[in-house]
Amino acid sequence: MAILSRDQLLAKQELKVEKVKLSTGDVFVRQMTGREKNRFELTLGHWEDYEEEGKPKQRYVRSLEDFRAKLAVHTVCDKEGVLLLTPEDIEALSVNMSGADLERISDKAQALNAITELDKERMVKN
């Protein structure tokens, strides 16, 4: 395999898009760019206020809550790879879509984006 040049490294890569069968129809799921994957990982946490020795402090708490819906929002697309959902859709998707369908989307998205169970554990470690 050839060694890539700087220009080749910086060239926009074509992201893989694959169809996923759901109980009510089909959707497309795609790979994320590096930036999109970083932004997805940031959705897996929040800042929390607490007190230590009577002094207010903050800590970053990571959680897998709504993991599948968050991943779907960052990967469900049309056949050309244009994302269909926004972060504002996470709660509605999580509450309204069946767990089985969210799992199908999540499984495909994890496979396309090389997200393993170990990666998920690392994402939520404090």
Image: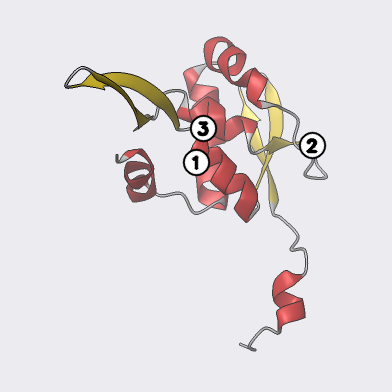
As drawn, the label of residue 78 is 2
Q: Nearer the viewer, residue 75 or 9?
A: 9
Q: Position of residue 25 (x, y in %)?
A: 70, 24
As drawn, the label of residue 41 is 1
Looking at the rendering, which quadrant does residue 26 occupy? top right
Q: Position of residue 106 (x, y in %)?
A: 52, 35
Which residue shows up at 77% across the image and 69% down it?
11
Image quarter where the C terminus lies is: top left
Q: In the drawing, does residue 120 fall left or right of residue 112?
A: left
Distance, label 2 to label 3, CA atoms, is 22 Å
Q: In the drawing, does residue 78 fall left or right of residue 72?
A: right
Above or below, 2 against 125 in this view is below
Q: Which residue is mark 3?
A: 43
Which residue shows up at 50% across the image and 41% down it?
41
Circles 3 and 1 in contact, beta carbons < 8 Å: yes
Q: Residues within 10 Å of mark 1 (few under 14, many from 20)?
A: some
Q: Is residue 108 visible?
A: no
- Going from N to C along the chain, the mark reached first, 2 or 1, is 1
Q: Nearer the viewer, mark 2 or mark 1?
A: 1
Q: Residues within 10 Å of mark 2 (few under 14, many from 20)?
A: some
Circles 2 and 3 in contact, beta carbons < 8 Å: no
Which residue shows up at 64% across the image and 39% down it?
75
